[in-house]
Image (tube, rainbow, N blue to C red):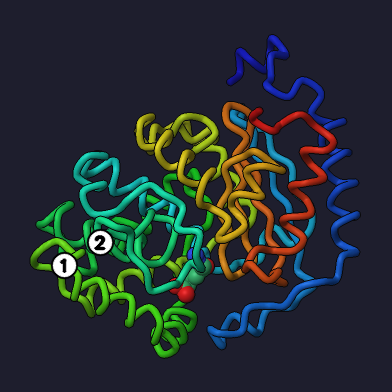
Amino acid sequence: LISRAMRQRFVIPDFTNFCRDIEAIYWHCKSSAGGKVASYIPQLARYDPNFWGVSVCTVDGQRYCIGDVTVPFTVQSISKPLTYGLVLDELGEDMVHQYVGQEPSGRMFNELVLDHNKKPHNPMINAGAIIVCSLLQTLAHKEMNLAERFDHVKQYFSRLAGDEYVGFNNAVFLSEREAADRNYALGFYMRENKCFPTKSNLREVMDFYFQCCAMETTCDAMSVMAATLANGGICPTSEEKVMSTDSVRDVLSLMHSCGMYDYSGQFAFNVGLPAKSGVSGGMMLVVPNVMGICLWSPPLDMYGNSVRGIQFCSELVNMFNFHRY
Ligand code: DON
């Protein structure tokens, strides 16, 4: 990094000007008022709709942020690509995909539906992420107890974030567990269809899934996670290899096709970059080999994506040529 700095060979050569443009888009999006803060988890409904943060971390570790970038929020569905990456690292693609597919479902993220092989369509929707949690619990690190496994996942998230803030919001965990009829229904439906590996305990799997969703982070820390994915699994700030290169490829491929709920196709068409959103209004956007961006603004559109986050992405690719095609 120092040698690149000395040679002035950064991936974004004129970072100051780039940041000025990001700032302009930020202010432009700030004035958008549409969308509704998620309310199905009571603790999420308390978030101020005015929160709006943008953090950028390049693969060289250059940073820029503006707005509410140090306010903690729960990762929710953005945990899905991260736990998927972890299970790929630990069990390998072949084993993982015996239990979960790679196709977009074309349905809501929490819909009671399996593919024609009676597997969840992909790991980015609830059914698939619940299966990923069951694989982490029963097949990977069999020696770990529940507490150790929780720490293991949390530490993995922290390492992806170069040791920046990753915490756990117990109130959100408890609140979600109380309001989780649909997720339990999915769990029972999948158990009926023999989707889980033998020995999984449904109650423990569901708790583990809610715990992963209730991990807490900030825009700043999440931009580093996104940058680690942009950088082939090597965290640009700690320089640690956290995720294997093959896992990163799989994670980004499915973020590209399935990361934005039922808007994934349009997002892939218009923005052309891998991304994942969550109901807390967070969004992780990856520009492979260039940078990771985290956007956070709680009001959501009809698909469940952050209104300001989506607007930011489309203005970003209008201004710069980041669309993969
Ligand atoms: O399963 C749920 O309802 C949430 N905890 C996560 C939802 C979320 O962010 C949407 N996911 N695809």
Quick one: 108 or 252, which is closer to the camera? 108
| Residue under numbered circle 1 | 194
Quick one: 300 or 60, which is closer to the camera? 300
* Residue reaching furthest to the top: 7
Q: Residue at x 58, y 21 (%)?
A: 1
Give residue 287's position: percent from left, percent from top.
62, 35
In the rendered view, does 186 fall on the left or right side of 263? left
Give residue 202's position: percent from left, percent from top.
21, 76
- Disc 1 C-beta below 8 A from ligand 1: no
The disc placed on residue 80 is none
| Residue under numbered circle 2 | 118
Q: Nearer the viewer, mark 1 or mark 2?
A: 2
Label 1 sits on what residue type?
Lys
In the rendered view, does 13 fall on the left or right side of 33? left
**In which image quadrant can residue 124 be found?**
bottom left
- Check if mark 1's residue and mark 2's residue have beta carbons within 8 Å: yes
